[in-house]
Each structure stands twice: as structure tokens, then as C-alpha cells.
Image (spheres, rainbow, N blue to C red):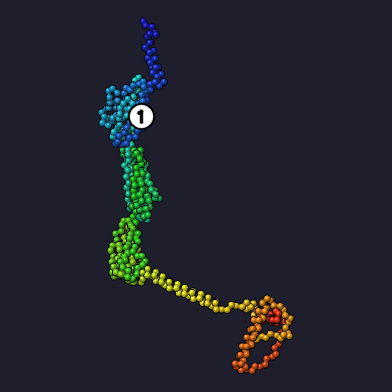
Amino acid sequence: MLLPEHRNYPHQQRHTVLFFILLCCMTGVWTSQVVVPHKVNAVLGKNVTLGCRVEVGSNLSLTQSTWERRLPSGSVTVAVYNPVFGISIPPDYARRLSFRSPSSLDATIILEDVGFADIGVYTCKVATFPLGNTQASTTVSVLVEPKVYVSAGSAPLIDGGNETVVATCIAERARPPAQVSWESDLSGRSEAQLLDEANGTTSTQVRYVWQPTRHVQGLALACVVRHPALQADFRIPYQLNVQYAPDISVVGYDGDWYVGRQNVQLTCKANSNPPAHHFRWIRLDGDMPEGVEVVNDTLLFLHSLQKNDSGVYRCEVANDISLRSRDLRILVQDQSQEQRSNSIIVAGAALGAVLALFLIAVVTIVIFTARRAPPPAYTDKVIDLPPTHKPPPPYTERPPAIPLAVHATQVASLSQARRSEHRLETAERSAARPVPRQPRSPPRQPLSYQEWVCHQNGADRVYINHREHYV
């Protein structure tokens, strides 16, 4: 009969081993870790990689790596790697599943041609000795990459028309739904619509609505699509095609058409979308002159210009949108612009020469006249001499002399000389013709003392009438 302590010995030994293993795990002597991504996005119809990195402690040994898939009916094994026995894959996955680089540290697998049936949770298990199994799980989601294209609106874009759909950007059958937007510098707006498909995908349509104008003809818009299945944003450019009536300009007339000028023509240029297909030249104020020919959009003057070529000419242009016209008035001058300019220059030069000669003559006359004129006497500017018909008063009635200024002597001498000249002229006229008998005038009244004042400077006397300012 065994003692109780001997009967319980094996049981106590097992507890000791388990405690030792737990102590080793707590102290980090034996560690094992499986690292997998939390979630993996797989694109429908493409390959997906399920990574599994094994981190085994130095005192542990890898016995086996296993991949399992969780299904509603339970877990199934899809791949096994054993360092001794190799790789084992079930027939259902043998064609599409493989280990990328199997080893004791890497249990990564590759699943090809992913479909919706591959959606689910996958678990990577690692069996080590003596710790046993360690595992980690990852979720596989299947993404459907959208099919992206741009379609034009149902109605053409016509300049000045109503607001209309320019184009529609479509991201078709995507999982999850794609993000679609328009990039543009125009003042339009976007209208989005989501359509659910039968296979669980979604189609996104975004229309761009805008009121057309010809000023942005040829401008490019951009449809931008974002989706997890795309490595980068997907862009599709779309060029605007705005239709408009012809914009007409006439070239060839430079404003210098004159009689005799040759080899002139008028060309009607039209900017339109779609291109113009009709050109016509007419004259509005009369018949088209002789010797003028229309070649497509050009009016050719095959003869030398004449005065009757002057007139109003019209160019008509039409495209699928509308018919437009442009009028041009042509004036044929008698001379060219260069000839007219030369005539103006010659006339100006002649007029300038005449003015120059006139100024020279005037200046010459003024200078010559100024040289011949006697210099004015200073006394002529100071006082006026007495008239010859007023003789000085008798000496007896003269008032006492009042001294003159500095120039009194000159004034007195000048006054006596002028009186002497006056007496001489009077005597000569009397001797030349008989003097008619004049009636006797009444005796002259003597001048009062207040009228005449005598100024004396030495021996010279000067009489000045202060009332009449006469000397």
C-alpha cells in the first residue's frame, strides 16, 4: 500500500511544470507573437496578399503555421505549412492560394482572382513548442473598382442658350460607391445621382450644368473619381464644344485707296463653330463694278481703282447656327495718302516762307524808321511852347521874375528861336501875296497878372501861362 504522498506525486509534478512554463512566459524567456493586418481590401478579380509575420522567442520552436477561414458553418483550413512535412492546401483553394515565402518567421499567403465569395475573416495560427498555438485574425473586404467614363450632354452647347447639361461623369458598379466631382473654373453646378446595382455595387452619376457662352470655347473640365480600389485619383478631361454664329471681320482696306491703285482685294474672315460654309459679297448702294470678281471669301478688284468703286460693300457668312453679315464703306480718293501729305507739306512750307518774309520786312521797316527819326528834345516832353497867335504881354505888365529850374536857359533859347522862325515865315507869305483888308478887331485886352508869369534866369526871361500851360 502506497502512502498518500507517494500516490499524489505525479499530480504535483504536472503542476510544477505548468507553473514553470507560466513563469517563463511572464519573465519573457519564451515569447511568441503573430502579426497580421487588421483589415485587408481586395479588389474584385485581382490578387490579394494576407500577411502573417511570426515572432518566435529564442527558446521556442515553430512546429506548424495554419490559415483558417471562418464560415457560418464553422472554421475550415485553407493552408498549412510544416517545417518538416511542407505545404498542404485543400483542393478548393489549390488553384488560387499559395504561400509567398514560407518559413518559421513568415506565413504570408496570396489569394488570386478574388471574388465576393472570398469576403470574410481569416485567422493565422502558429503552433510552437512548448507554448502551443498562437493566432491573429484579419478581415478581407472585396472592393469593386469603378468603371469611369464621361458622356456629353444630350443637347449641343449653343452660345447664349439656356442652362443645359454639359457632360455627365459616371463611376459605374463600384463597391463601395465612388466619390465623383467636377473641377472647373466656370460658374456651373453639379448634380449627383446614385444607382444601386443587383450585385451589391453602386453606380454614381454626376452631371455638370452650365449656361453656354462662346468665350470659353475649348476650355477643359476635369472629372475626378476617388475610390479605395484606386491607387490615386482618377481624372478624365473633357473639352467644351460651344457652337456660335460667325464673327466676321473684313481685311484688305487700309483707308488709302486712290484712283489708279492696283492689286487690291477685300477678304471676309469668319470665326465660327461649326466652320462657315457660305460666303457672299454684295454692294448695297449700287451694282457691283465691272472688273470685280468673287473667289470664295475674297472680293478681287482686277482693274485699277476708279472713283465709281467707292461704295458700301457687304460680306455675308453662314454656318449651321446662323447667318451674319458685315458692311464696309470704301472711299476712293483722287490722290494717295502720301501725295496728300506731300501737298500739305509743300503748302505749309510756302506759307511759312511768306510769313517769314513778311516778318523780316516789318522788322526792317521798323529799324530803318527808328534810325531816321530825330531824337526827341527833353523840353518837348516837359512843357508846351505858347502858340504863335499869342504874343507875350508888355514888359511893363510882367510880374517880378521867378527863378526857373535848372533848364530855364534852354527853354528860353528854344522859345526865342521859334518866335524868330515864325516872324520870318509870316513876312515871306505877306510879300508873296497881297494881304486882304481885314476888319479892325477890337483892342486886345491885356493879360492879367494871373495868366502869365515871368521866369527869369540871368538875362533870359520866359513867360508861362499857368491856366493854359503855354509858355
Q: In the picture, residue 253 is in which quadrant?
A: bottom left
Viewed as shown, does residue 255 lie left or right of 450? left
Can you give x and y, in whole percent of width and height, for residue 384 in the image?
64, 80
Q: Is residue 440 left or right of residue 108?
A: right
Q: Looking at the rendering, which quadrant does residue 344 occupy?
A: bottom left
For the C terminus, give its image quadrant.
Answer: bottom right
Residue 122 place in picture, x, y as percent: 33, 29
> Percent position (x, y) of residue 323?
32, 61
Residue 438 figure quarter: bottom right
Question: 459 or 267, which is in the foreground?
Answer: 459
Q: Is residue 378 at least partly visible in the picture?
A: yes
Q: Residue at x 31, y 56 (%)?
A: 274
Position above or below: 348 against 173: below
Residue labelled with disc 1: 36
Placement of the N terminus among the 4 image quadrants:
top left
Residue 192 seen in render: no
Q: Residue furthest top?
A: 1
The residue depicted at 65 percent of the width and 79 percent of the height is 410
Which amino acid does the dot numbered 1 rest on? Val
Tell me where residue 436 appears, x and y as whole percent. 62, 94
Residue drawn at x 47%, y 75% is 358
